[in-house]
Amino acid sequence: MKIIKQVGIIFSICCISVLIEQYLPFAFPASVIGMILLFLLLLTGLLKIDHIREKSDFLLANMAFFFIPAGVNVINYLDILKVNWLPLLLICVFTTVITFAATAYSVRFTMYLLSRGKGGHHE
């Protein structure tokens, strides 16, 4: 019964986020709305992590499984990928470098803030 309740909570948040998406005057992904909604519910304490822990752990452990349909669907677009392989490769390399840099600077900034909060100095 506990698992059914957890699945119900997660799917309810997903359904609410889809409804919110439909009523927004601009395009915004329901999945992002759902993550924001879940974050706010956890932040305010209206939802406790124990209410969804087992099911969320299961979903995280099996996340790769959910990417299989998207990966298989790429086969439908091989002709487009063959024509545009160079721009796509450049975009992938460029965005990977930007992601690495943003992550590195975020970690550095977080370490700086933590060391400043403890009164120490970290370089």
Image (cartoon, rainbow, N blue to C red):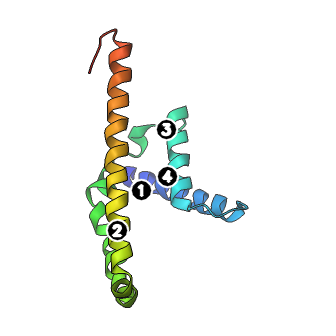
Q: Residue at x 38, y 74 (%)?
A: 87
Residue sitting farthest toward the top: 119
- Do residues under tags 4 and 2 come within 8 Å of each other at their CB atoms? no
- Pointer 1: what residue? 4
Q: Are marks 3 and 1 in contact (CB under 8 Å)?
A: no
- Where disc 4 sits, the SS reads helix
Judge by depth and name the residue closer to the eye, 29 or 83. 83
Give the foreground label among 4 and 1.
4
The amino acid on which the numbered mark 3 sits, given as a three-letter code, is Leu
Q: Which residue is mark 2?
A: 90
The residue lying toward the viewer, choosing from 10 and 116, is 116
Spot occupied by residue 74 in the image (x, y as percentages of width and height): 35, 81
Q: Residue at x 34, y 43 (%)?
A: 103
Q: Residue at x 47, y 54 (%)?
A: 10
**3 or 1: tag closer to the N-terminus:** 1
SS label for mark 2: helix
Camera sees residue 77: yes
Q: Which residue is mark 4?
A: 9
Separation of marks 3 and 1 at Cα, in angstroms: 19 Å
**C-alpha gap between disc 4 and disc 1:** 9 Å
- Where's residue 48, x and y in %? 45, 37
* Quadrant in which the C terminus appears: top left
Label 3, label 4: how far apart the Cα atoms are: 12 Å
Which type of secondary structure does the marked residue at label 1 adopt? helix
Is the residue under label 4 in contact with that under label 3 (CB below 8 Å)? no
- Say if 75 sits above or below 42 in the image: below
Report helix, strand or loop for mark 3. helix
For the residue marked with disc 2, what is the amino acid?
Leu
Q: Give the residue pinned by disc 3.
A: 42
